Image (tube, helix red, strand yellow):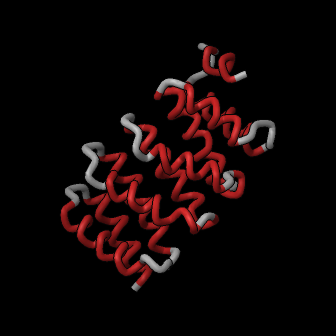
Amino acid sequence: MFAQLFNDKSLKPKEKTEQLAAMLLSKELSTDALLEFADKAKDPIKATCVEAIEFATLKDPGILPAEQLAVIIGYLDAKAPRIKWESAKVVANTIHLHPRQIDTAVLKLLANTDDGGTVVRWSAAFALAQILKMKTSINAELAEAAQAISGREEKNSIKKIYQEALKKIR
């Protein structure tokens, strides 16, 4: 099924993502099956799979069990920027349902705040802001880190994410 979808040249990449997301939301496809396929796929296909999970978890965060969130958190270390940024968005959408994974996610997201890619840094900021808003036991340290990152970040769009999150927790 996956090979057929990804080999279909009549579909644009966005259409493939949307089809996968729709299949996840309708329970026609499980996140487990999609991630099992993605693990063996090349980076562009893996990124599309993670993006489909991101689209689906935006509408229904509960479709991603803790075990699969752990896999996504592992993808934050990927070499491919798109895998990193799509994974960060999945974390942002779902971490509130899996608070035991916050520490691991935060460590990997903080590492991505120094990435050379603007979108990777933006996505890491977005996910860290969502975690800050949860007001967990690590908030004091995370708020301090967010303040420091905001101070050194050159892009105003990324600074703004941190500053808005910090305002909401004060």
Q: Quadrant of the C terminus?
A: bottom left
- Observer-nearest residue: 117 or 14? 117
**Residue 163 x %, y %:** 33, 72
Left or right position of 52 against 75: right
Question: Is 105 placed above or below 29 here?
Answer: below
Q: Quadrant of residue 166?
A: bottom left
Q: What residue is drawn where x is 42% and y is 43%?
A: 84
Q: What residue is drawn where x is 41% and y is 52%?
A: 123
**Residue 117 x %, y %:** 29, 43
Left or right position of 131 against 107: right
- Observer-nearest residue: 105 or 121? 105
Left or right position of 58 against 115: right
Left or right position of 137 against 81: right
Q: What residue is drawn where x is 58% and y is 35%?
A: 49
Q: Quadrant of the N terminus?
A: top right
**Residue 148 x %, y %:** 23, 69
**Residue 169 x %, y %:** 43, 82
- Observer-nearest residue: 64 or 159? 64
